[in-house]
Image (cartoon, rainbow, N blue to C red):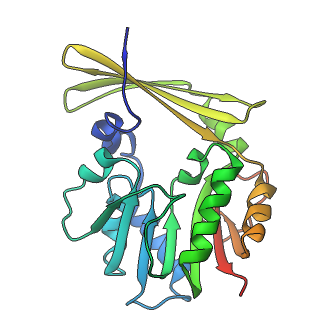
Amino acid sequence: MPIRSENYSLVSKIYPHLMRKISYEYWADYLFLISKNFIKRDAFVLELAAGNCTLAKFYNKKYKNIIATDLSFSMLNSSADKSIKKVLCNMISLPFKNSFNLIFSCFDSVNYLLIKKDVNKLFANINNLLSDKGIFTFDVSLENNSRIHIKEPIREGKYKGITYKHTTSYDPKKRIHKNSFEIKLKDKTFTEVHRQKIYPFIDYFKLLQKNELFVLHCYDAFTFKDATENSNRVQFVVKKMR
């Protein structure tokens, strides 16, 4: 029977292979276009759920005062870039006392918050840490995106001697998207199960407003077209009300 491992403790080892088709440089440029009119080059920047800090590495070329955070030590530790400050912490309980001009989170990391109470805690943290003229930008996955991914429910691969099987599924009643990884490492097999909550589009607006944040823009991800509930992934650009 496979051994259950902590989320991202082993997926961190194959993560570069899982994300091999993603252009982080293009992603960083897109975020820069979103943020450049609101903040200066000497801005203080905070990334939530930074993973292996690949995006932070490219964003660090734009803004030098950047802190990358993640809940997984394995993911942060897999980054060899010593120029980026890294902090191990949970996005719903951020340990900072100073404010940030830009806070961002990418690749539907907010979807990993499985209950609305935790999304509310995140937005409360943002309200406390975001500077008065700063922006918070994050992307989330919507239901259409889950429907697309389950069309290819099983993927297999090999990376640096590690073989893996990735199974994806979606429960429309519970609105839970599940990614299961079976990872073979030497003579043992491990499993990791990652769950994401696919919240209704309108819920984000309600929770942001509850925490005195307002949506300046909401785009179809990687574009500047207005998002809708039928979008696959959306990019929020948020400011404080006061």
Pick the quarter of the image with the C terminus: bottom right
- The image shows residue 161 at horizontal and vertical percentages of 19, 27
- The image shows residue 10 at horizontal and vertical percentages of 31, 33
Would residue 221 be visible to someone looking at this image? no
In the rendered image of this protein, does residue 82 appear above or below residue 189? Answer: below
Would residue 132 be visible to someone looking at this image? yes
| Front one among 117 and 81 | 117
Q: Residue sitting at 68 percent across and 66 percent down? A: 219
Name the residue at the top extreme. Answer: 1
Q: Residue sitting at 66 percent across and 30 percent down? A: 170
The quadrant in which residue 112 appears is top right
Pick the quarter of the image with the N terminus: top left
| Front one among 16 and 10 | 10
In the rendered image of this protein, does residue 126 appear above or below residue 12? Answer: below
- The image shows residue 124 at horizontal and vertical percentages of 64, 67
Q: Residue sitting at 78 percent across and 49 percent down? A: 200
| Callout count | 0
Q: Residue sitting at 32 percent across and 74 percent down? A: 60
Report whether 123 appears left or right of 57: right
Report whether 230 appears left or right of 10: right
Report whether 77 appears left or right of 42: left
- The image shows residue 173 at horizontal and vertical percentages of 78, 30
